[in-house]
Amino acid sequence: MSPFAAVLVSAALSTGGAAPAAADPAPPQSTVMTCGSNNPLPWAPAFTWTIGAGSGASRPDGASTLQPSILLRGGNELPAPPPGLIPAFGINWYGTRVVVDWHNQTTGASGTSVSDTEFLQQKPGIPINRTLTGVGTVSFTVKVDTGMGWWFINSQTAVCRGTISVLPV
């Protein structure tokens, strides 16, 4: 063994031979998820929801201050109705409701939030949802119920999962 190799082996043995482990990085403050859904309208094709979730702030009902929360936005690739009065008499009506089950891995808290509901929409979207999680790393499941006219008629459910860091307000 050469003197140079002996020095390298000696240095590796004296330092344990391994680099220190890096800490797990915090999850991002936002994520975009896609999840498929059957169409509640028997004559229409299945479609995909694209849902964005991000750290934000919401005002709980009756409260005057904002609280750390998950904010949702999203849509799908269903065709938008043409402009004008005639589409108002169409047969492609949807209703939507969102349920978020969440677990704050930092605090141990968990819960479920249910969105406002939308009905008689020709292009369904993600209704307003207040998911008050507190600050920390939050894992969550978003369930989008889409129905014929109202979310509960022939309801079809799309399920997306994610994890984000919810920041202080």
Image (cartoon, grey):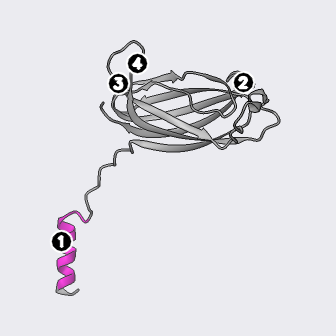
Look at mark 1 in the image and give the residue it sits on: 11
Q: Could you give the CA–CA distance between mark 4 and mark 3, rounded to whole angstroms?
A: 7 Å
Residue on which the image places disc 2: 149
Disc 2 to disc 4: CB gap under 8 Å: no
Mark in the foreground, 1 or 4: 4
Identify residue for label 4.
60
Q: Position of residue 2 (x, y in %)?
A: 20, 87
Looking at the rendered image, the quarter that the N terminus falls into is bottom left
Q: Earlier in the sequence, mark 3 or mark 2?
A: 3
Q: Residue at x 50, y 22 (%)?
A: 113
Estimate the spatial distance between the alpha carbons at disc 1 and disc 4, rounded to whole Å.
Answer: 59 Å
Q: Amino acid at mark 4?
A: Pro
**Which mark sits nearer the N-terminus, 4 or 3?**
4
* Discs 1/3, front: 3
Residue at the far right in the pictured view: 43
Q: Which mark is residue 145?
A: none
In the foreground, 115 or 9: 115
The amino acid beneath tag 3 is Gln
User: What residue type is disc 1 on?
Assistant: Ala
Q: Earlier in the sequence, mark 2 or mark 1?
A: 1
Identify the element where label 4 is drawn: loop
Between 62 and 17, the one lying in front of the other is: 62
| Image marks 4 and 3: residues in contact by CB distance under 8 Å | yes
How many labels, in total? 4
Q: Crowding near pointer 1: few (<14 within 10 Å), some, many (20+)?
A: few
Magenta segment, principal secondary structure? Answer: helix
Q: Which mark is residue 67?
A: 3
